[in-house]
Image (cartoon, helix red, strand yellow):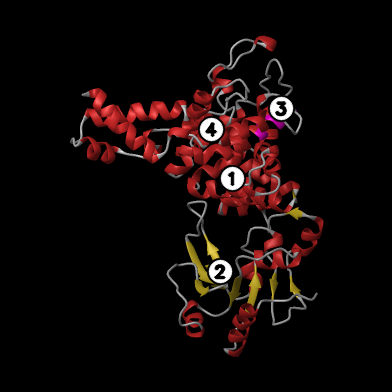
Amino acid sequence: MNLELPEFVLKILEKFEKAKFEIYIVGGSVRDLLLDREIIDWDFTTNATPNQILEIFPKGFYDNKFGTVGISHPSSPEPYEITTFRKEIGYTDRRHPDKVIWGKSLKEDLARRDFTINAMALQGKTPSELIDPFNGQKDLKAKIIRAVGDPNKRFSEDALRMMRAIRLATELGFTIEQKTFQAIQDNATLINQIAKERVKDELFKILKSDFPADGFTLLLSSGLLEQIMPELLKGYGMTQAKHHIYDVWTHSLLSLKNCPSKDPLIRLATLLHDVGKPVVAKGEGEKRTFYNHEVVGASIAGNTADRLRFSKKEKEKLVTLIRWHQFTCDERQTDSAIRRFIRNVGKENLKDMLDLRVGDRLGGGARETSWRLEKFKKRLVEVQKQPFSVTDLKVDGNDVMKILKIGSGPTVGKILETLFAEVVEDKTKNKREFLLKRIGELGKSLG
C-alpha cells in the first residue's frame, strides 16, 4: 500500500512520535484514503491524554468530555480532531456516552466505532500497513456497510448510526449487510430519541448524494422513513388518473431522481411536491382528482420543516416551491400572468422552480426535452426586464414631492401608481427624463 499524506498530517504524526506517543489516522479518513476520495476531515487517535495533546499543540482547544482536542489548520474550515483512546459506557440518550474512560489500546478504541469500514487505522509517515481488526478493508472492497460487532448494540448506543448507514450506502453506492439492515428495521423507532437537527443533517447529506432516490428507497424499506417523514408514505400505492403512469410515491421518487438541482432543499421540495395528493384525493381510477393538492401540500411541507427544525428561510423556500409548482407553460399567457407567477414564486426561486418542474415531468415518464418549458423560460427572461412594481420606476416619491412642491400624502402615491400603469403598458417609458416630465403634467391635471 502506497498512500501519500498531506504535509500537515505528516507534521502531526511527527510531533507525536517525537513526544514518544502512539498516533494513528482513523475512521472515515482511512476509508476515504483507501477509496481515493477527497478527505475533508482528518481524524486521529492517540494514547496521549488531552492535557498531553495540548502540551504538543498548545494552540489546540479541549472543551468536551469525550477526550477530543481540536487543532485548527488553514486547509480546513473545521478543526482536525485528535482523540485519546477511549471506552464508552452507557448511552441513555441513544446518542452520547454517559461516561468516557481512557482506553488502553487502539483495538479497544476501534471496537467502539460504528462500521467496519470506519474501524481501520494507519500509522507512520508513509503508511505501509493497515491496522484492521474487524476486516473493514474486505468490506470496503466488497462495497458492504457492516456494523462493528453486534449491530443492535451499536444502534442502541447511538441511534443516528442507522441514518449514517443509509447515508454512507447512498454516498458510496454500497449495500448494507443483512444483519446490520435487520437491526435498523428492529430499532427504527429509536431514531425519535435523536435531536431533529441531527436527523435533518443526515437527510440533507442523503439528498446531496449522487443517488438520493436510492437513499429514500432504503429509508422506506428500513422503517426509518415512517418515523422521520410519515407524510410521504401516504402516497405509497396511491394510483393516479389520466396521464400518470405511476403511483404518487413512485412518481415522487422518480421526480427526485431526475431533478437537475444539486441543492438538497430543492431536491426535497421535488420529493414532497405531491405530498398533498393523498389528503385531497377524491374518486377512483380514471375519475380520481387531487384538486388544490399544491395548497394542502405546502401546508404539510411547512409542518415537516418545523418538525425537522428547518431555518425560517429554508421553510419559506420549501413551502413556496410546493405551493406554486402547478404553474402552466402556455404560450398564450399574457405578460401580466407571467409577472404574477414571478411575484408569487420570487425571482430568486425561479431557477429552482424550473428544476422542480423538470424533475416532475421526467418523474412522470415524459421526454427529456419540452419545447413549452423552454419557451416559458425565454418568456420569464423577457418579462423580468419589465418593471414589476412602483419601486422599479426610475423616479420615486421624493421626485414627485420636489417637482410638485408638496409634502408626503396620497397624491404622491396616486401619481406613482399612474406612472407605473403607463410603464406597464409601454416599458420604453421607464426613463427618468420622461417620467420627470410626466410628473409635472400629472400634477397640473390634478390641479
Residue at the (63%, 38%) spot, across then down: 355
Q: Is the residue 171 above or below the residue 77 in the image?
A: above
* Disc 1 versus disc 4: nearer the observer: 4
Q: Which residue is mark 3?
A: 364
Q: Which residue is mark 1?
A: 264
Check residue 401 for magenta coloring.
no
**Taking the image as drawn, is residue 135 in sight?**
no
Q: Is residue 261 left or right of residue 94?
A: right
Please tell me which residue lies in front, 2 or 296: 296
Q: Which residue is mark 4?
A: 383
Mark 2 → mark 1, Cα distance in angstroms: 23 Å
- Image quadrant occupied by the C terminus: top left
Three-letter amino acid code at the position of disc 1: Pro
Which residues are the magenta region?
Answer: 358-365
* Disc 4 versus disc 3: nearer the observer: 4
Three-letter amino acid code at the position of disc 2: Ser
Check residue 361 for magenta coloring.
yes
Q: Position of residue 135 (x, y in %)?
A: 76, 64
Q: Which mark is residue 180?
A: none
Provide the secondary structure element on which disc 1 rests. helix
Q: Is the residue 142 above or below the residue 103 in the image?
A: above
Q: Is the residue 291 above or below the residue 4 in the image?
A: above
Mark 1 → mark 4, Cα distance in angstroms: 29 Å
Q: Which comes sooner in the sequence, label 2 or label 3?
A: 2
